[in-house]
Image (cartoon, helix red, strand yellow):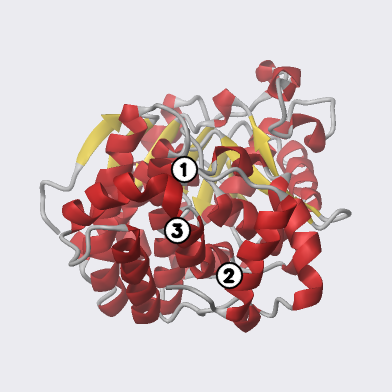
């Protein structure tokens, strides 16, 4: 890997970036006052040698570390409750969030909840509900991503499924941003191509939707454009050659940039994606990637001038919304992403329910074209049938 792809950054959180930097985990724990942290990850990752190696790093440094891994691919409230119970029973004093978006989201939610008296859903991202949090009860977090997709390692929220309602909810507080982030692209080299493509498209979508979102935020726009440029260059390479460390590093950077930029907002890729994921327990990145070209075309009248600038940045042959839609379709095909929602198991009978949920998702309000149930049903129906271009 290029030695220049290494550094300590302090935006939007303290980030230690570079190959091999997971070895500095004990220092990150100590800086946050952790003597007995709980590492939270997913069941599959917990079984891999990579996780054992990380635990050994802490043990060797005199920092005994517990493990909690009972987390679904789309984490549910019960997973968070179980994690809180393990944290308290083990006498832990901090959380290491280790894994992909699911593990990171669950871990941040556990760290939030270990000192709260109110239920998790009281902290959903609605109005000023975040002010209900007793910040004195929040545990410190070191985040160590092992995929390059959600960017949750630098995010202020967690997406958790309310299983009773089959609905994804965003739990938010400004202080949910981890206190230290270790971004070691070497941890991503063994991701299989299919997962690399799906999570990479999620990273791309964060940057792309942030750039398109309503509102004036030139800092977010600048970060998003660079994140798109990096993903466009690195994602096909990482997909085809998972050992290419430069591509892996650039995708990890793009992922953190997307989660930083989407403080501006997201849009229908995510509002529809959250509705589908909550109802069908589908992989988030795959769902978002499937929706991408349909949402771009749907938003076309409101974002065409921005898409002209994007086409020039990416050196696409057509400087228009059509050029970006074509680019998205070609990229999806290269990565083996399903073309239609029907391919994901969605049917006509689901459309009305999904549209209603999407319109009420927190990410819907920043979509460039205002969403209502009628036009969202049309959008979902087109994605169901594969009507684009």
Residue 229 is left or right of residue 84, and the answer is left
Whole-angstrom CA distance, mark 1 to mark 2, is 19 Å
Q: Of 289 and 94, which appears nearest the observer?
A: 289
Q: For label 2, count other residues whose C-alpha is less than 10 Å away and answer few (under 14), some (14-19) or many (20+).
A: few
Disc sitting over residue 153 in the figure? 1
Residue corresponding to mark 2: 44
Asked whether the residues under the numbered discs 2 and 3 touch, taking CB atoms below 8 Å apart as contact, a structural biologist would say: no
Q: Nearer the viewer, mark 1 or mark 2?
A: 1
Whole-angstrom CA distance, mark 1 to mark 3, is 27 Å
**Element assignment for label 3:** helix
| Residue in the image at 34% along x and 58% along y | 321
Disc sitting over residue 296 in the figure? 3
Q: For label 1, count other residues whose C-alpha is less than 10 Å away and answer few (under 14), some (14-19) or many (20+).
A: many
Q: Quadrant of the N terminus?
A: bottom left
Q: Is residue 313 above or below residue 247?
A: above
| Residue in the image at 10% along x and 50% along y | 3
């Amino acid at each position: 890997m290029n030695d220049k792809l290494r550094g300590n950054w302090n935006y939007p959180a303290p980030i230690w970036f570079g190959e091999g930097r997971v070895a500095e985990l004990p220092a990150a724990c100590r800086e946050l006052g952790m003597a007995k942290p709980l590492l939270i990850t997913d069941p599959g990752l917990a079984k891999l040698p990579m996780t054992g190696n990380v635990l050994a790093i802490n043990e060797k440094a005199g920092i005994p570390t517990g493990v909690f891994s009972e987390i679904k691919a789309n984490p549910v409230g019960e997973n968070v409750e179980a994690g809180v119970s393990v944290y308290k029973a083990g006498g832990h004093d901090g959380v290491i969030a280790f894994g992909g978006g699911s593990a990171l989201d669950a871990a941040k939610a556990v760290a939030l909840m270990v000192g709260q008296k109110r239920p998790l859903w009281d902290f959903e991202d609605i109005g000023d509900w975040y002010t209900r949090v007793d910040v004195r009860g929040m545990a410190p977090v070191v985040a160590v991503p092992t995929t390059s997709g959600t960017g949750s390692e630098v995010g202020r929220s967690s997406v958790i499924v309310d299983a009773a309602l089959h609905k994804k909810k965003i739990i938010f507080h400004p202080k949910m941003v981890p206190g230290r982030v270790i971004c070691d692209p070497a941890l991503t080299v063994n991701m299989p191509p299919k997962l690399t493509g799906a999570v990479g498209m999620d990273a791309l979508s964060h940057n792309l939707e942030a750039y398109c979102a309503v509102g004036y935020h030139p800092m977010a726009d600048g970060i998003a454009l660079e994140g798109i440029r990096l993903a466009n260059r690195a994602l096909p390479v990482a997909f085809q050659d998972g050992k290419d460390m430069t591509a892996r590093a650039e995708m990890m950077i793009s992922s953190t940039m997307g989660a930083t930029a989407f403080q501006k907002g997201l849009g229908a890729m995510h509002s529809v994606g959250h509705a589908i994921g909550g109802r069908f327990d589908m992989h988030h990145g795959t769902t978002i990637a499937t929706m991408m070209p349909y949402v771009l075309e749907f938003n076309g009248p409101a974002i065409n001038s921005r898409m002209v600038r994007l086409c020039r940045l990416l050196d696409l042959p057509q400087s228009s919304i059509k050029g970006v839609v074509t680019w998205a379709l070609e990229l999806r095909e290269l990565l083996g992403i399903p073309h239609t929602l029907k391919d994901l198991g969605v049917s006509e009978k689901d459309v009305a329910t999904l549209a209603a949920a999407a319109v009420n998702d927190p990410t819907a309000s920043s979509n460039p074209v205002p969403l209502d149930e009628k036009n969202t049903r049309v959008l979902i129906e087109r994605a169901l049938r594969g009507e684009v271009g």
